[in-house]
Image (tube, grey):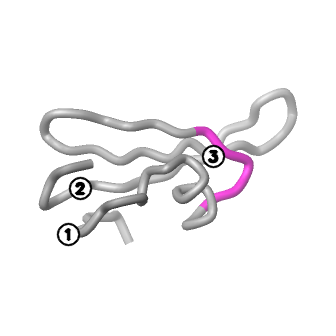
């Protein structure tokens, strides 16, 4: 994501009786979505969401 500010969020849901996590990274022009069985940085790295991000991260924490 080539933006100075990106909003990150994650939300859990059941998929075939397993808890999966939907991870989002959004700017005013695009949204990336990755589904992973883990939450947090491990999933963001696996989804290549944080690969080259160097800006302000906005979260709901």
Q: Secondary structure at mark 2?
A: strand
The picture places residue 51, in percent across and down from the top left corner, at 42, 58
The reply to whether callout 2 and callout 1 are in contact (CB within 8 Å) is: yes
Front residue of 45 and 9? 45
Please check the rendered image and state whether residue 53 is part of the magenta-colored stretch, yes or no. Answer: no
Q: Give percent across and percent down for residue 13.
A: 66, 39
Q: Which residue shows up at 31% across the image and 35% down it?
A: 31
Q: CA distance from mark 1 to mark 3?
A: 23 Å
The magenta segment is: 35-39
Left or right, 51 with respect to 54, comes to right
* Residue that badge 2 annotates: 6
- Residue underneath mark 3: 21
Q: Is residue 41 left or right of residue 54?
A: right
Q: Is residue 58 left or right of residue 41?
A: left
N-terminal label among 1 and 3: 3
Nearer to us in this view, 57 or 4 = 4
The residue positioned farthest toward the right in the image shown:
17
Is 48 located above or below residue 22 in the figure? below
In the depicted structure, whether residue 12 falls above or below residue 8: above
């Amino acid at each position: 994501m080539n933006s100075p500010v990106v909003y990150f969020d994650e939300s859990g849901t059941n998929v075939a009786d397993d808890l999966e996590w939907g991870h989002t990274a959004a700017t005013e022009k695009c949204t990336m979505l990755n589904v992973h069985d883990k939450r947090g940085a491990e999933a963001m790295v696996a989804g290549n969401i944080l690969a080259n991000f160097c800006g302000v991260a906005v979260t709901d924490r």
